Image (tube, coloured by chain):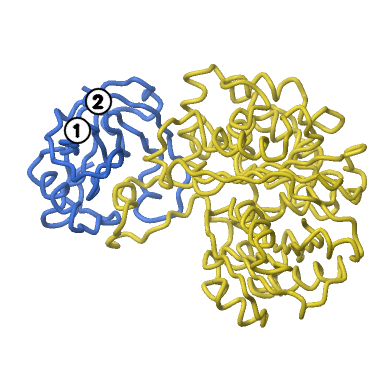
């Protein structure tokens, strides 16, 4: 179960480098639950993305975690949903007792806002590996998701206004978070009137670029009983991958959520109707739509109508991204850990004005790559 | 789009060198598995369906736009000087799909299902990169 959570400073922390985000988040997670650093015997990270010194073996040395279990699974933004699954299995199997997961990025302060549209390769550079078949064409990160949105619109008649509704709802929650990057209310028209970045995705269909970091302390249920905060139990977790590079996506209107979702629900003995709040990877508005359909919160192709019905809004029956999400609050490159942290805050009743009344079961779903590797974690406040 | 190549250059490897060299001759190749018949791109050392070693087949070079986007913002050279442009997933009439640019048509006139045919640009010696334009 998840015993401790910690956030570093966001959305902009020019005085912190990536490793300092890891450290600050860890310090706060330890203080949150009262675990001593010396009790950590497992370390998990997805580093090597922003600052190359944050790969997990280097971080384990830097943090001086003398572990008997290490996992460096890197599936992009969904890494941390995979980490929870792996850590829970490792603890259950007795490989370790207490796992620390950390993430930190100074993306905004160090790199600026070019992640989505900056290109990954230099002009004239020789590109090896599978990306050699895409690099000559100047696609952007936004462009990859845009091609999914375009196909979804073609097959199902999904509209830009329906996608915009997702951004509007998330902004409503961001207004309640004093730390969120953007807090002023927006309308569907604001989204549609914002600059087109890669058709059909507008600027306000895209997540922010921020700094930020997060940490989790995962331990045994037995140990958690003596800690400072009520635990969030891992009821079911699963991950799946369909492709990595966007040209290899087998079906542009279905992602791996359709495979890992049913496994996670089965392990938890639950269905989508049992979920009180969802924290979804909202790199782009279309990402949310794909995860909703994949996990079975609505039928395939029905995501546009589903979001128009207001389920995801404050006061709806499935409030989503109650911290303001990546669309409005915090997205330092890989957002998956924040989905888990916000889920735990909701289950503890610590979400302040954004608290979902009587939230007992929360679902976090991360998307890594280009809707490539999807990780689903179902958390509950009661022992299963 | 005829110009000196200023884009990233595919780094030909043990399998892809055959693909890029064919491109330099004006031929688009895909792979087909002699064991199970699976057709695939990008080319690999194995059939993704059954694991056998695939064979090369020359494609007709015709296909349709399966999905696409119009890139309107890209900070990277040389693409920033070519905005807006179309990035597409093209489905060949033989089945396999690949990423490419669709050129020779205003970006706003590209749509899913648009019939396109291949042409090549030489990125470096022995490396011909496929692009598509409307038929």
| Of callouts 2 and 1, the N-terminal one | 2
Q: Which mark is residue B118?
A: 1
> What is the chain letter for disc 2?
B
Residue A330 percent across, percent down from the top left: 70, 53
Q: Using the image as rendered, state which of residue A229 and residue B108 is in the foreground.
A: A229
In the depicted structure, whether residue A291 falls above or below residue A237: above
Evaluate if marks 2 and 1 touch, with contact meaning CB atoms under 8 Å apart: yes
Chain corresponding to blue in the figure? B
In the rendered image, residue A233, in percent from the top left (x then y), is placed at 79, 50
Residue B67 position by quadrant:
top left
Query: Badge 1: how crowded within 10 Å, few (<14), some, or many (20+)?
Result: many
Q: Chain of mark 1?
A: B
Measured in 3D between alpha carbons, the distance from the residue under mark 2 to the one under mark 1, in whole angstroms, is 8 Å
Q: Which mark is residue B63?
A: 2
Picture layout, residue A201 above or below residue A26: above
Where residue A154 sits in the image (x, y, percent)? 47, 20
Mark nearest the camera among 2 and 1 is: 2
Q: Which chain is yellow?
A: A
Q: Secondary structure at mark 2?
A: strand
Q: Residue at x 49, y 35 (%)?
A: A146
Indicate the quadrant where residue A218 lies. Answer: bottom right
């Amino acid at each position: 179960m998840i015993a401790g959570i910690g956030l570093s400073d966001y959305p902009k922390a020019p005085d912190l480098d990536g490793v300092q985000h890891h450290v600050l988040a860890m310090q706060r997670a330890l203080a949150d639950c009262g675990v001593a650093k010396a009790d950590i015997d497992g370390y998990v990270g997805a580093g090597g993305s922003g600052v190359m010194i944050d790969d997990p073996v280097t971080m384990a040395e830097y943090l001086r975690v003398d572990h008997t279990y290490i996992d460096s699974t890197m599936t992009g933004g969904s890494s941390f949903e995979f980490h929870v699954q792996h850590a829970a299995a490792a603890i259950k199997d007795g490989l370790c007792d207490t796992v620390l997961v950390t993430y930190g990025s100074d993306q905004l302060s160090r790199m600026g806002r070019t992640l989505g549209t900056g290109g990954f390769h230099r002009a004239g550079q020789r590109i090896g590996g599978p990306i050699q078949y895409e690099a000559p064409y100047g696609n952007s990160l936004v462009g990859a998701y845009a091609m999914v949105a375009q196909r979804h619109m073609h097959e199902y008649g999904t509209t830009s206004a329906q996608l915009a509704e997702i951004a509007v709802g998330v902004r409503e929650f961001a207004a309640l978070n004093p730390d969120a990057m953007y807090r002023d209310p927006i309308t569907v028209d604001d989204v549609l009137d914002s600059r087109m970045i890669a058709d059909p995705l507008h600027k306000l269909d895209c997540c922010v670029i921020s700094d930020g970091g997060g940490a989790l302390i995962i331990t045994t249920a037995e140990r958690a009983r003596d800690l400072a905060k009520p635990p969030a139990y891992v009821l079911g977790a699963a991950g799946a991958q369909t492709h990595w590079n966007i040209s290899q996506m087998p079906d542009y209107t279905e992602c791996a959520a359709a495979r890992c979702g049913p496994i996670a629900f089965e392990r938890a003995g639950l269905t989508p109707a049992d979920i009180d709040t969802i924290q979804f990877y909202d790199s782009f508005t279309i990402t949310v739509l794909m995860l909703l359909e994949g996990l079975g919160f609505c039928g395939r192709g029905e995501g546009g109508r589903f979001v128009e019905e207001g389920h995801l809004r404050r006061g709806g029956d499935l409030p989503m991204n109650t911290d303001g999400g990546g669309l409005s609050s915090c997205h330092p490159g890989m957002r998956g850990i924040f989905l888990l942290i916000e889920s735990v805050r909701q289950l503890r009743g610590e979400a302040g004005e954004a608290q979902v009344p009587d939230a007992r079961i929360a679902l976090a779903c991360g998307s890594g790559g280009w809707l490539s590797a999807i990780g689903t974690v179902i958390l509950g406040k009661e022992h299963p | 789009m005829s110009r000196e190549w200023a884009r990233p250059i595919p780094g030909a490897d043990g399998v892809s060198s055959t693909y890029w060299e064919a491109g330099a001759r004006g031929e688009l190749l895909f792979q087909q598995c002699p064991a199970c018949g699976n057709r695939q791109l990008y080319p690999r050392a194995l059939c993704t369906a059954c694991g056998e070693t695939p064979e090369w087949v020359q494609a007709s070079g015709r296909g349709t736009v399966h999905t696409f986007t119009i890139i309107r913002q890209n900070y990277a050279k040389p693409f920033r000087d070519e905005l807006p442009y179309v990035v597409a997933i093209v489905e060949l009439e033989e089945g396999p799909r690949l990423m490419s640019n669709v050129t020779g048509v205003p970006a706003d006139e590209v749509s899913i299902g648009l019939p396109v045919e291949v042409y090549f640009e030489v990125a470096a010696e022995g490396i011909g990169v496929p692009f598509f334009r409307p038929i």
